[in-house]
Amino acid sequence: MAQGCVFPFRMMVVRRAPDPATVTIDKPASAKASVLPGLTWLLACQSAGEVLARLTHVGLPGPVLGMLILLLLLRWDAVRAPVGAVAEALLAHLSLLFVPVGVGVMTHVPLIAQYGIQLVATLVLSTWVGLLVTALVFRAMLRQSDDRAAEAGTEP
Amino acid sequence: MNDFVQLWVYLSTTPLFGLTATLLAYLLAQAVYQSVGQAPWANPVLWTVLLLALVLTLSGTAYPTYFSGAQFIHFLLGPAVVALAWPLWQRRNELRQRAGPLLVAALAGGIAASGSAVLIGWSLGLPQDLLRSLAPKSVTAPVAMGIAEQLGGIPALAAVFAVLTGLIGAISAKYLFDLCGVASAPVRGFALGTASHGIGAARAMQVNADMGAYAGLALGIQVVLGAVLIPLVARLF
């Protein structure tokens, strides 16, 4: 298990190009820091989230509660430094993590073929509707709130 | 020859095969993706999946056998969701200022994506259990499965629809936004994370850090909204 988890990380760290936008803000103390403390924090937060989800029945998945817990903990430098390096490496290769589920689509090819055109049309059209509605509403709301901020004389 | 067959039979049944094949296929797809300047059609998830599906089909390897190795990568989805706290924390001030627009847009986009999927699917004559599996399609795959189960849909199908939705968004969003004149990186990122969850967010993170952070935020909000609201709304029908 540990072998399987550590292996992709090494490559992620090596392959990651420095990112100017994140280097300036809250840069982890050492980008070369070992991945183990950070990974342990992530897993500990996820475990705490899973426990909380089962105890409170809030209807939120464990990892999401774990994310909220980590968000609270990040105000401490002792958490921030190790988590930053690992989080960036992990998120840089987020695509990879969807591959196993993605390959699972092949086991449902007969069903997709059965409803072929209707299913594809539904998925494509609704995705476009979702993308456009979100983008247009967000843009309109941002303009409105930025205008209001400008009127009040504060930085938008 | 017989030795080779035996060796293959051994290799293809160990978890080592699924894990190694996934990483090799991904590195290859990633190299191609970089060499064509990260063009959306070269999406690394799409091509890795197609390549692996081809290898599994040609070698006659069953999906569960493959998954026994790939599960080590699949497992990291959980820690990756937790890790989303990092880009959020980095932009905490900006996000606090924009809390109102962010929430309204996430709600509107989530309702539009889920509602239009059910409506379009229904008008095209898709059966009930498929519609129920379609409803959570813009929530990230593991969470979508849980929601579909509550709705009386088919969890495995919900995961399939979520993955396809992610791919459709990641591949087509750039062209759609260019066509409709949506230029701002935060807006594009937030829309990608809302309508195409993790796969859309992964694409956004590769394009630029600003777009990625907003996509990660959208993904997080959508998980919360979807898990709470979709079962609630579905109870009305």
Image: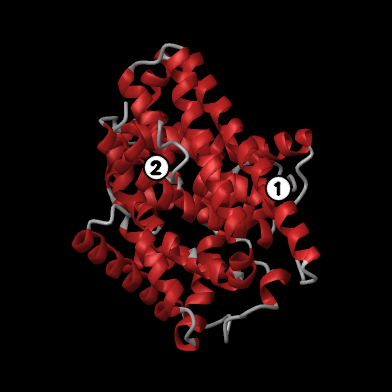
| Residue A52: image location, x then y, percent | 25, 65
Q: Mark 1, mark 2: which one is toward the viewer?
A: 1
Q: Chain of mark 2?
A: A
Confirm whether residue A18 shows in the render.
no
Disc 1 secondary structure class:
helix
**CB-based contact (under 8 Å), mark 1 and mark 2:** no
| Residue A143: image location, x then y, percent | 75, 52
Which of the numbered marks, if any, corresponds to residue A101? 2
| Residue B101: image location, x then y, percent | 62, 53
Q: Residue at x 38, y 43 (%)?
A: B229
Q: Residue at x 26, y 37 (%)?
A: B149
Say which of A139 and A51 sits in front: A139
Say which of A83 and B87 sits in front: B87
The answer to whether residue A11 is left or right of residue A43 is right
Residue that numbered label 1 is attached to: A139
Q: Chain of mark 1?
A: A
Disc 2 crowd, CA 10 A, few/some/many (<14, 14-19, 20+) = many
Q: Amino acid at mark 2?
A: Val
Disc 2 secondary structure class:
helix
